[in-house]
Every structure is written in C-alpha cells, then in structure tokens.
Image (tube, coloured by chain):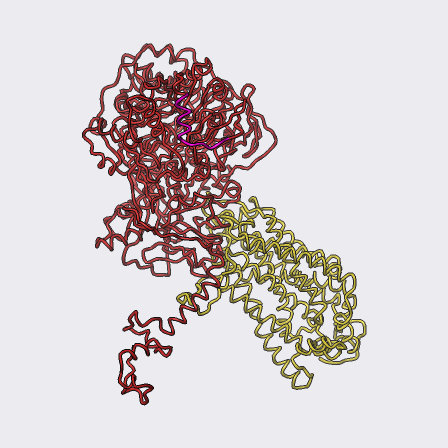
C-alpha cells in the first residue's frame, strides 16, 4: 500500500500546533508586517476617497458611457465574487468529500471568501446612479404602495444569491472558529483579550457535547454551502446570460462562470498562501508544498475547463448562424479590444499549462507568478465579456469605445487595499490555521498512527 | 363619529353626558379619546384629524423632514398677487408669431407657460413650411434666455486698436441724445441684413429720408451671386423661389437645397411632396457635388465632381441636352463654348452627365437645376449662375419650377453693397455707421474692423458685445424677436406678424423701437408711440382687407396663394450673359471649399448649446469644424480622422483637425463656416476655427495647401460606425422593385413565441417613420430637446459617449466609400411590446403602460443601467452627472410639463406622454373623445417632410394604422421579437440599381 505523505511536517506535537498558530495573535507584529499593513492601509484610504468622489459627484467620473453601460465596477464585482469561490469549495465541498488535506488551508481560504465577497458586495451598490437608494433592491414591505422589486430581473436574483452567500460563508467561517477562539481565550494572559475571545467563543468548553453539536452544525453548514458554490456564480452569470445582448446571451455561462470562479479562487488562494508562508515561516509546516501542489492541479484542471468554454463559445457562435453573435466573437478576438482577449487567453489558458510539470507545481516563485497571471487573466475575462459585448452590438451607429479613467483604476486598485487590509487584520486577530482541524490530521502519513 | 349615547355607556361621567348635550358631544368628538373609527365613510371635515391619520401625517412629515429636505434643493415659490388675464397656472398659452432666421422665414406658434416662451412650433397655416421647423428655429427659444446677452445699452471706451477694453453701461435717454447729435452731422450709413420685415423696411425708408442716410444690405450667407446671375440672364434682380414641389427631376450642383440653401425647411417640405408619390410621378434628385452635403445624402444619384468642375459640368449638361439629345431649339450657337467642357467632363462623370441630361429632357418643364450657396461662390460663381439659368431656360423650367414672380423678394443682401460701404468708409464719407442684424467683423471675409477706423461713431444694434459690438462705440441692446413686435415677408405675398411673447428680459429695444425713438426726436413730422403702433398703422394702411386681430390669430396672411400656385411663362434669356462663360478660372490642384452647416450656418447662434451639440446631419460631428478630405486623399497623405493639419492660403494659415469624408472629391478640402467665434459667449467662444480667415474673397475654389502637423485631436462624433455591416437596419429598394413588390428587400422573420401577446384594449400608441420622406435634417432632434428638457453635455462628454438627446438620426453609408449612397434613420425609444429593458430593471422603474408605451419612472430609478445595456436600439440615456443646474436664466426655457431628471437616473423618449396626458385631461373636461391626429409628438410636429406619424394602432382608420398596413413597413431588428411600436417604412430610391456594400467594416 502506498504510504501517504504527511499533511503536517516538522514533527509537531499538539502543543507545538497550538503555540505555532496562536503565536501570531499573541505577539506584537514585526516590522515586515507593519510595513505591509501600512502600505495597504494607504491604498484602502485612497479607495475610500475615490469612492467618495464617485458617490458625491456621479458615475460620470468613471469610464462608463452609452453603449458600454457597465464597466470597471461590474467587472471587478464579478472578479471578486469569483475569487470567493475557492474558500467555500475548500471548506465545504472538500469537507464533505473527506479531503483531509484541506484542513490547514480551509480557514484562510474561507476568510478570503468572506473578504472577497465583502469587497465585491460594494461594487454593485456603488455602480448604481443613486447608491443611497440601492436598498430599493431589497424586497421589503414599504410605504410606497407597497412597491415590490421586479422579480424577473437577474439583478434581484443577484441580490439574493450574493447576500445568501455572504451570510452562509460568514456563519460557516465563524462556526469553524469557535473552538479556536476558545483556545485563544484559554491562553490569554491579558484581560481584554480574554473577554473578547471569550465572548467570541460563545462559552465553548470543549466538552463531548460541545464537540458533538459542533461537528453536526459544521457538517450541516457544509451541506448548505455546497450548492452555493454552484449557485452564486451561476446567478451572477445570469446578469449577463439573461440579457439580449450578443456575447452575453449564451447558455454556457453558468458552468463557465463557476469553473472560472473556482479557477480564479484557487489562484488567489495560492497568491495569499505564498504571502502567508513568507510572512509566517512557521506556517510552512502546515501549508506544505503538497498542499500547494494539489491546488495547482485544480488550477490546471479548471483552466482547461475555462479554455474549453472559450473554444465552445466560438464554435456555438459559428454554429448558431446568428450574425450578431458571430460578429461579436470575431470582434472580441480581432476587434479593437482584441488585446484584452489575448491577454485573457494567454493568462487563463496558456499559463496554467506549466503545471503539467511537477517541478513548476512545487516551485513557490513559479506558482506565485502564475497565480497572479491567472488572476489578471480572470479580471480580463470579465472585462472581455462586459466591454467587448457592449461596445458593438446590434446597431453599428451606436458602437462606441470604453476608456478607463483615473477613477476606474482607483476603484479597481483600491479594492485590493480593502481586501488586503481585512486579510492582514485577519492574520493577526484570528487563528489563521484551524487548530481544531489540524490536530486530528497531525499524524496522517506518519508511522505513529493516530486518528483516521 | 359615533354618538356617545346613554344606552351604550353604563356609567356617565357628567350630567352633560347623561343629558346627551350636543355641546358635550362635540367636545367628546374632539377629545383625545376620539374613536379610530372616525376614518370611516361618514367623516366630516369638522372631525379633524383622527388619531391614525394624525400618526400617519406625523410619520410622513418625519420621513419628509429627515429624507426629503436633505437632497432636494429648496426653492421659494411665490403665488400671483394679481393673476394676469389669460394666464392660468399650469396651462400653456399659444401665440402665433413668426421670425426670420437669416434668409429663411417661419410662421410660428409660440408656446408660453406662465408668461414665458418655452417652445417654438411651426405654424401649420404657414403655406411654405407646412408647419415644419428647422433645428435652428427651435433653438431660437434658447437664445432668448442666453445668459451672455447684454442687459442694458453700453458705451464702449475704445482704445486705439479698437480691441475694446472698457465698457460702461448707460441709459437710453443719454444714448439717444448723443446719437441724435451724431446723426445730425450727416454722413449716416446703415448696414443691415436683408430687410425681411416690410414695416421695418418702410421705417428705414423714413429714417433714410429724415437723416439722409444710405442703406447697405448685406447678409452673412448672401445670395448676391444668384441675384446677379438672374440680372445678367434675365435683366431683373430677383432671387427666385425654387418650386421643388413642382419638380419631378431636381439636379443640384454643389448646392445643399435641403440643408442650408435659401429656405431649406420649405424645400424639404416641398421635396417630400414628390418623394411620397410612390409611383411613376415620384421625383428624382441628382446631385453633382464636391463635398458631401445633406442634399447629396438624399440624392437618388450622386456624382462626385471637383469644385473647379462646377461650371464645366453645367456646360457639359447643356451640350448633352442640346447636341446629345437634340433638345432646345434656338440655343444651338453654343457649341464652341460647351463642347470642350463636354469632352473634358465626359471623361470624369460621363455616365452621370448622360443620365442627368436624359432625365432633364424627359422631365423638361418639370425639372429644376440649382446651383448656389457658399460652396459655389468661387471665382466662377457668376458663370455658374448663367450656365444654370441657361439650362433652366432651355428646358423650359423658368416660370414653372423657377418662380421669379413670387420670389424671395426681400432677400437682397449682396457682397457689392458691403464693398461699396467699405469703400465709402475708407474714403471717410461715413461719419455715423449703424449696424444691425449682421456681425460683419466676424462674418465678412474682408477686414471690417480696419474700415471702421475712419468712422466717427459706430453704433451696433445687437444683443451682445460680440465681434462687431466690440468695435462699436455704442452697443444698443436689441430685443430678441420673441420680445419684440415685427412682421415678415420673405416670399412675396406671404406675410406674417411677429408678436412678442414676453416682456423684454433686459433693458433692450427692438431696432424698430430704436428707429421710432430717433425719428420722434428728429424734428420731423414723425410721431408714433412705439414700434407696435407703427406696425399696426403700417398694416392698417397697406392691408386694408386684413383684420389686425385676425392676422394675429392666424399668424400668417397670405395674399398671393391664388397667383403663386400657377405656372407662368419663361423669361427670355439674354444671350449677352453667355460672355460670362468664357475665360473661366481653371482652378488648382487642391481647392478649399467653405460650406455652412445645418446647425450653425453663419455662426450667428453660436452661443446656443443645442446647436453646438447638434450633430451635423452628414458627418454626425458636433462642437467643432474640421477639414473634410476624401478617403483616397487621406490615404495618399497618410491622414487619419482627427489629425491636425495646417491649411495655408497665401500667407494665411489655420490649423484644423481632419475628417475623412466618404463621397468627397479628392481635389477639395471642405471647411465649415460659423465656427471660431471669439465673442459669442461662454458656449460659442473658440469652438473650431474661423474659416473666413482663409478666404481670398471667395468662399469656394480657394487654392490651398495642406500639411500634416503631426498633432492630433479628437472629433466629437455621436455615431460610432458608419456602415450597416450588411444588417437589415435601413431597408431601401428601387422604385421599380417596389412597384413590383411593395415588400421588396425586406427580410421578414418567422417568429415563434411561447407567450401570449400583451392585450391592449384601449388605445395603443405607435409611431411610423417614413424613411423615404426623412431627409435627416435633424429638426426633430432639437424639437425633442426643447420639448423634453434634455441637457447638453459638451464636447468632452460627447467624446466619452455621454450624449443625452432622446432621439437621434443614424446615418449610414452604403457602397464604395469614394462615392457612397447614404441613408438617414431617426431612432427614438421603440416602445417595444416585449421591452427588453422592462424585464431587467430590478426596481421596476421602467414599466409598460396599458396604452403600449414603455414608461420611465424617474424617481424609482436607482440607475443600474441594465436597461440601457439590454436595449438593442441603445436609446436610453443616463444622467451621469447632475445636468439640471443650468446658468440663469436658461432654466426659463424648461418645459414645466416634463420633469427634469436628477443625477443617476435613466431617461429616454416617452412618446411625449405629457402631451397625451394634457390632451386627455383637456378632452375629459370638455367631454370630448380622442380623435386621430389630436396628439402630435414633438418630433412629428416639427418634421417639415411629415415623415413621422404618431397615433393609435388599435384604431383601424388612423393614419398610423394605414401607415403600418403598408407593405413596406418593417420593424427594426424584428428577429429579436421585441415588437417595437416604432416601425419604419422602406426608403425608395428612384434609380435603376441600388448601391451595395462591397466592403464590410472599415470607415470607423
């Protein structure tokens, strides 16, 4: 029988695990971390200023126009929502499939999901002309008639999909955190830390009853969030697919979007894990090269699916015989925005192919660069879908171009400030690897035996 | 209110209660213990607010104070203390009036609301324009509220160079005194544009005799060349009226009869008459052009010639008619003149000459050859007129399609007048110069500023301190035509009165008032209270048959309709004029041709943002002028759209961006007049360049050199692409194909749907667009803008694709880009039955009405813009910024019937739903019911060609239903099954064969 490779290296004991993981919360941050955090803060503040300008002055500050009514905001929204998918997939789907290797990355991947959804969630609100009225998209009893939302609109489905996803992800993440919060509480020497983590751990005592309930809830939540992995991005894709616009109006969008989401999500996990491994060298024992390799395999697989989707879109456009559809796809690859299409193809289809080689799958610098390329590619995928379809549709007289302004770039780049601020805060405030879940898999692949 | 009765209450609280005292009852009812049941059906006002309604009101006011007042700007409203007669708040008043836009006259109906004019419509009883309007005419209402108008008479303290550094306000009394003193010194000259007002003309006559003044008439776009040509050929100075309605074959040589030449609105109305005859009587338009004009885009056949070939072409046509087809007895002594041109031109446009000559002869007496306007005013301008007159005389068109009797008799401005004025100014003969109605410093090609150096007193009667104002000693603020009395006779025998619709906004006087004031004080026997009394007495004297109040009601007084509409014999052609045809200027390799645009023309209304943002009907560019070059010229010199080139004529030089224009001659460069003003106001200053800077005295055929500068600028083009890419967008068919099959060239789709259709039990609105009648003049665009308060956004945002106009006219080219055909397609909201916008709006801000319109609810809109993305016609407009804050007093031009839209909401064409509502309410009150034609949309009302028909689809007898029933009706993008309520009718071309798109893509 083939021997399993250990999931945690460095001959850790239970105590070591607790020490390693809690240390990050308990000791003051180093100069590296502070430097990174402050620069990310600056970016975040810049983001707030940019958004404030847009809200107070008008959407006109951005590059959107007629015919390109959606631009950077929607592109970046879909981008961040897509990023979120890896977290749920790792924590819920892999949990249900009893993939033990998920334990050490699940927490961070979930945190990434939560923050990505938070970052994403701002965009649809801010892209509206009157964001202060965006709550009208919620169906609630009101004094206006009552006037209800239009349930036929995919944007309403989107509101439900994203808010459900955000809620379930946060709850799932939080439930997983309860035993670990209790550990931090128990180790706390500082009064306030004890109080705060004590409150967060909801009176966890670690009794068999607690564990019994906990595992039951965790599994139920995993079951609940699994369909969300498929539904959220399917519904986000409806924002496009339900429209009449050639280039948007295709049935392939739901699976294509889901595959793309997982693809980009895993790429983002790789990027973040590389950063975490660099910032916290001790975590290299928990987030091992084996983990990274598995994720690279997933990136390669989903990359192939995405590549297939690109090809199939072209085939269907040709096969359909619809002239508008055909024009859009020819224009997509060879029109004025052809450059964005080829950036997308080279980043999303060609880049992941390097992971056929084991050497590259296990090389941190290679995968770091590749994962960033994939994320660039996935942003451009949404750019291609949104902009190239809109800019030339049915009536040639209304063809136009879309140019990003300072505020477009500000919103795009600034959103990373928000995401990374949250992520870095998370690293210092929350156990970044699940103590409770890593301990049971400590001896997997080792002769000492242990839990199965 | 329930009675508190003894039977119901077990215990009584007081003796009053026990006695059931009425006073006590009322006390109880107003007590805090009032019953919530008081909201029931028997509530009387005395009951006061019940608890629930009180709480409701309080809740609402809390909500209002916390939300409502934060963002909505608070504005005070003041009620009338004494309501003026005739004015009912909320109800519009309509006044018949008229006004002259240069050489074009309009009978108008002015809509006023609460005493301020907000819209100008064409007067349907105007016999010439047929109720149609031009884009410029609509814009006139905005020029009334121009913030840059001068507010009081001014005195300019001129420095030596007359670049006007200081201006002081003064009073009329003071100004009049000083000017009268100056007038009495003698040497008085008056420079005005064509005097189209008969009363003002007689007033000027009086002024001339009292002050022994000389009167010079000059127009910025003048027709002196036509008049001189007429005089040479027929002996009379006359500017004939083109009877396009009578012509079955029209041939234009570099003349934009439908866009800018003479009276384009009435030309368009007349042209549509023959266009709409879809039988063998349909008219045919052939254009020979060096530049692509609006007329050229409407031509059935169009041939490209160079500007230097204008006269040779006309002579080649003479040759072909006389010698080729053997028609025209008595004109056979011309061979020596015509034959060299014929042989030269046959090599260039032989096919066109043959075909045109054939048509001319076939429709002799019913054909019309036209040349004139800026683009023909080259060195050979007079020769061209002679050649064209010769053709018309040979063909017997004179007196039939060329109406020299009921002509534009008051349009008499000529260049020679201007030249003689300048001569006498330079000679020091002019001591006092009065300028009114023209802006010669800007719009004359010579140096007018220098000539005024010798004039002691220059008086400018104008509405602002513009280019001419700045060199004048006195600026006499002139009232806007909407503020002043006047009258109009542009076409002989068609009179109209101009009545003011608002008291002058500022301390201004009309020119007539000023003259009356001066004449009253001149010591002569002249004594009138003001211009109004003068005009009234003038009419009483001259039109004894007319009742003044009736004329005011009708707006138009037509004295010549019976004689005007019959043909008369031709005049005899004066053969001595033929000498003009010898020794023609040969032209040069590259010639500059100046032209005027439909929107700005001579630039007199440059400060009106509507016109600056009005896309040129041909190029679709706004906010700029540009050098147009042909495609092959651009390829040869490696020029791209927007490249800045330097145009040099002699030692004069201008830098302008290039526009690559399909269908233009490679030996000409076109440049629009009317741009490059420096003192027009905030909007019009420094937009484009002043084309006249390059004029060598001519407006066409100016030898020019063009050099690339390497710099680039962007041209604000509202249209993204100019080919239909082989899609079924505008359907056209030849007349013969149409006669064989009315559905010719329409590809109908078989549509299968799972859903049942919407049911419309009452009215169902629809709009039919006759692409065959539409010339693309664009008056509907400005009509819509004026009606619906749509904002202008400026060049910067047009470049970004942020134009706001609710309706647009798409213009596509078909065929070889060197000589393409063009089509125009008005596009507004299609009000689809299965509207793609409606399903995707998350907040149901755009919904379907039971009358089939797609309604936009502005205050529900949160601005996701999904509707705009999903609209295949791209007719939705988004408020990217707050566009409602306009500079005072421009807000007075707003139509209160149409709400202004706040930032962040979507807007679009409503089918003028406010007009539907207004009429419905009016008819409800009057107890009438809706009849077909009761409601006109703004675009429909403005269209001189009557290409738009609005009405009820459910009424089988409506004009609309008849239009929809025509076999040539089709839906735009029918295959999407949106079932639009706006449908189009095929464009029919009177040609043998259609031009086909050879290339796809291209020409961006």
Type of secondary structure dominating the magenta stretch? helix
- Would residue B351 be seen by someone viewing this image from the given angle? no
The residue under the point 76% across, 62% down is A278
**Quadrant position of residue B460:** top left
Outermost residue, right side: A11
The residue under the point 72% across, 75% down is A193
Residue in the foreground of this view, choosing between B220 and A220: B220
- Left or right: residue B489 versus residue A353 is left
Outermost residue, left side: B545
Q: Colour of chain B?
A: red
| Mark count | 0
Is B511 magenta? The answer is no
- Left or right: residue B654 versus residue A273 is left
Which chain gets the yellow colouring? A
**Quadrant position of residue A191:** bottom right
Q: Which residues are magenta?
A: B167-181
- Left or right: residue B284 versus residue A272 is left
Q: Give the image location of residue B962, x and y in percent.
A: 26, 46
Is B171 magenta? The answer is yes
**Quadrant position of residue A309:** bottom right
Residue in the foreground of this view, choosing between B490 and B127: B490
- Would residue B180 be seen by someone viewing this image from the given angle? yes
Q: Give the image location of residue A331, x and y in percent.
A: 54, 46
């Amino acid at each position: 029988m083939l021997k399993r490779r250990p999931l945690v290296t460095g001959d850790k004991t239970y105590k070591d695990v607790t020490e390693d993981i809690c240390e990050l919360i308990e000791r003051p941050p180093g100069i590296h971390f502070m430097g990174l955090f402050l620069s990310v803060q600056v970016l975040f503040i810049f983001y707030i200023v940019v958004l404030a300008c847009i809200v107070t002055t008008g959407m006109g500050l951005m590059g959107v126009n007629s015919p390109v009514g959606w631009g950077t905001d929607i592109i970046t929204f879909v981008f961040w929502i897509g990023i979120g998918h890896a977290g749920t997939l790792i924590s819920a789907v892999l949990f249900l499939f009893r993939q033990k290797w998920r334990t050490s990355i699940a927490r961070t991947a979930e945190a990434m999901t939560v923050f990505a959804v938070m970052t994403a969630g701002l965009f649809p609100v801010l892209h509206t002309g009157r964001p202060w009225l965006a709550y009208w998209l919620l169906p609630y009893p009101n004094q206006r008639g009552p006037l209800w939302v239009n349930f036929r609109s995919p944007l309403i489905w989107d509101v439900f999909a994203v808010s459900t996803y955000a809620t379930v992800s946060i709850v799932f993440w939080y439930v997983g955190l309860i035993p670990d919060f209790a550990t931090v509480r128990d180790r706390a020497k500082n009064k306030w830390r004890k109080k705060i983590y004590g409150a967060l751990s909801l009176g966890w005592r670690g009794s068999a009853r607690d564990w019994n309930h906990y595992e039951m809830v965790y599994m139920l939540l995993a079951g609940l969030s699994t369909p969300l992995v498929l539904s959220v991005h399917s519904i986000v894709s409806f924002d496009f697919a339900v429209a009449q616009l050639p280039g948007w109006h295709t049935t392939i969008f739901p699976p294509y979007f889901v595959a793309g989401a997982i693809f980009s999500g895993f790429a983002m996990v790789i990027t973040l894990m590389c950063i975490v491994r660099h910032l916290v060298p001790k975590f290299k024992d928990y987030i091992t090269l084996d983990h990274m390799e598995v994720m690279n395999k997933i990136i390669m697989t989903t990359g192939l699916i995405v590549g297939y989707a690109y090809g199939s879109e072209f085939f269907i456009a040709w096969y359909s015989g619809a002239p508008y559809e055909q024009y859009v796809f020819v224009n997509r690859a060879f029109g004025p925005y052809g450059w964005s299409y080829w950036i997308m193809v080279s980043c999303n289809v060609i880049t992941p192919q390097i992971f056929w080689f084991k050497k590259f799958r296990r090389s941190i610098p290679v995968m770091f660069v590749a994962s960033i390329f994939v994320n660039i590619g996935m942003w451009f995928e949404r750019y291609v879908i949104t902009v190239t379809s809109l800019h030339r549709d049915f009536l040639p007289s209304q063809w136009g171009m879309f140019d990003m302004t300072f505020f477009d770039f500000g919103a795009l780049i600034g959103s990373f400030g928000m995401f990374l601020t949250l992520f870095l805060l998370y690293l210092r405030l929350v156990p970044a690897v699940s103590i409770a879940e890593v301990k049971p898999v400590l001896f997997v692949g080792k002769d000492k035996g242990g839990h199965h | 209110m329930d009675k508190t009765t003894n039977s119901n209450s077990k215990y009584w609280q007081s003796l009053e209660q026990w006695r059931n005292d009425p006073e006590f009852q009322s006390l109880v009812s107003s007590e805090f213990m009032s019953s919530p049941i008081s909201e029931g059906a028997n509530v009387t006002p005395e009951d006061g607010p019940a608890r629930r309604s009180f709480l409701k009101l309080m809740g609402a006011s809390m909500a209002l104070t916390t939300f409502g007042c934060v963002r909505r700007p608070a504005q005070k409203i003041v009620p009338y203390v004494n309501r003026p007669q005739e004015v009912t708040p909320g109800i519009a008043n309509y006044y018949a009036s008229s006004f002259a836009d240069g050489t074009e006259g309009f009978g108008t109906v002015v809509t006023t609301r609460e005493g301020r004019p907000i819209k100008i419509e064409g007067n349907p009883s105007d016999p010439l324009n047929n109720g149609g309007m031009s884009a410029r005419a609509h814009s006139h209402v905005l020029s009334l509220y121009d913030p840059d108008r001068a507010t009081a008479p001014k005195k300019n303290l001129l420095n030596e160079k007359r670049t006007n550094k200081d201006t002081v306000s003064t009073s009329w009394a003071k100004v009049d005194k000083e000017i009268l003193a100056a007038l009495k010194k003698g040497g008085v000259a008056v420079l005005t544009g064509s005097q189209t007002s008969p009363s003002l003309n007689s007033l000027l006559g009086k002024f001339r005799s009292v002050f022994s003044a000389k009167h010079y008439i000059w127009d910025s776009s003048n027709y002196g060349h036509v008049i001189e040509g007429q005089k040479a050929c027929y002996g009379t100075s006359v500017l004939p009226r083109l009877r396009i309605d009578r012509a079955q074959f029209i041939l234009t040589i570099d003349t934009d009869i439908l866009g800018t030449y003479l009276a384009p609105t009435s030309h368009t109305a007349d042209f549509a008459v023959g266009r709409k005859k879809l039988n063998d009587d349909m008219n045919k338009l052939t254009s020979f052009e060096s530049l692509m004009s609006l007329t050229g885009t409407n031509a059935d056949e169009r041939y490209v010639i160079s500007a230097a070939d204008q006269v040779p072409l006309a002579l080649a046509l003479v040759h072909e008619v006389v010698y080729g087809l053997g028609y025209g007895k008595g004109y056979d002594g011309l061979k020596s003149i015509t034959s060299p041109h014929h042989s030269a031109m046959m090599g260039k446009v032989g096919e066109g000459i043959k075909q045109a000559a054939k048509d001319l002869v076939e429709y002799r007496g019913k054909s019309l050859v036209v040349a004139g306007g800026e683009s023909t005013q080259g060195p050979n301008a007079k020769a061209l007129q002679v050649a064209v007159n010769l053709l018309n005389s040979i063909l017997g068109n004179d007196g039939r399609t060329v109406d020299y009797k009921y002509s534009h008799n008051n349009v008499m401005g000529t260049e020679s007048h201007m030249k003689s004025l300048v001569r006498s100014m330079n000679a020091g003969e002019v001591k006092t110069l009065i300028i009114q109605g023209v802006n010669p410093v800007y719009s004359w090609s010579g140096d007018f500023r220098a000539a005024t150096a010798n004039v002691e007193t220059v008086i400018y009667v104008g509405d602002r301190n513009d280019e001419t104002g700045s060199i004048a000693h006195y600026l006499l603020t002139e009232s806007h035509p909407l503020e002043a009395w006047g009258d109009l006779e542009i076409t002989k025998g068609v009179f109209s009165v101009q009545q003011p619709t608002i008291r002058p906004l500022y301390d201004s006087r009309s020119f007539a008032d000023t003259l009356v004031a001066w004449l009253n004080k001149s010591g002569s026997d002249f004594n009138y209270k003001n211009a109004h009394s003068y005009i009234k007495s003038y009419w009483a004297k001259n039109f004894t048959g007319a009742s003044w109040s009736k004329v005011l009601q009708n707006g138009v007084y037509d004295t010549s309709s019976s004689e005007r509409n019959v043909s008369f014999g031709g005049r005899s052609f004066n053969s001595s004029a033929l000498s003009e045809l010898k020794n023609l200027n040969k032209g040069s390799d590259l010639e500059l041709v100046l032209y005027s645009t439909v929107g700005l023309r001579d630039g007199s209304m440059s400060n009106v943002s509507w016109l600056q943002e009005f896309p040129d009907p041909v190029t679709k560019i706004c906010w700029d002028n540009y050098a147009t070059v042909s495609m092959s010229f651009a390829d040869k010199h490696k020029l791209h759209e927007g490249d800045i080139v330097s145009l040099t004529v002699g030692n004069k030089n201008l830098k302008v961006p290039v526009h690559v224009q399909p269908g233009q001659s490679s030996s000409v460069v076109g440049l629009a007049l009317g741009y490059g003003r420096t003192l027009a106001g905030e909007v019009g200053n420094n937009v484009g360049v002043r084309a006249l800077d390059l004029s060598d005295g001519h407006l066409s055929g100016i030898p020019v050199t063009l050099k690339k500068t390497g710099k680039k600028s962007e041209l604000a083009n509202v249209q993204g692409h100019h080919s239909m890419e082989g899609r079924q967008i505008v359907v056209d068919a030849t007349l013969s194909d149409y006669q064989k099959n009315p559905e010719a060239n329409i590809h109908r789709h078989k549509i299968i749907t799972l859903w049942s259709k919407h049911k419309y039990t009452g009215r169902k609105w629809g709009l039919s667009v006759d692409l065959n009648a539409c010339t693309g003049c664009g008056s509907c665009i400005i009509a819509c803008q004026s009606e619906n308060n749509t904002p202008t956004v400026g060049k910067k945002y047009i470049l970004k694709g942020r134009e706001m106009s609710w309706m647009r006219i798409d213009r596509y080219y078909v065929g070889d880009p060197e000589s393409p055909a063009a089509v125009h397609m008005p596009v507004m909201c299609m009000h689809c039955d299965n509207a793609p916008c409606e399903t995707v709006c998350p907040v149901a801000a755009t919904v379907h009405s039971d009358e089939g319109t797609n309604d936009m609810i502005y205050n529900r809109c949160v601005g996701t813009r999904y509707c705009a993305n999903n609209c295949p016609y791209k007719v939705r407009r988004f408020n990217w910024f707050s566009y409602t804050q306009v500079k005072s007093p421009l807000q007075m031009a707003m139509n209160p019937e149409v709400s202004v839209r706040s930032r962040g909401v979507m807007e679009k064409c409503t089918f003028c739903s406010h007009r539907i509502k207004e009429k419905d309410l009016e008819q409800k009150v009057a107890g009438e019911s809706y009849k077909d034609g009761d409601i006109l949309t703004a675009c429909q009302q403005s269209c001189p060609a009557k290409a738009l028909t609005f009405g009820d689809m459910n009424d089988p007898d409506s004009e609309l239903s008849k239009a929809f029933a025509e076999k040539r009706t089709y839906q735009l993008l029918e295959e999407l099954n949106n079932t639009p309520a706006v449908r189009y009718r095929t464009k029919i071309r009177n040609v043998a064969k259609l031009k086909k798109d050879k290339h796809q893509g291209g020409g961006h």
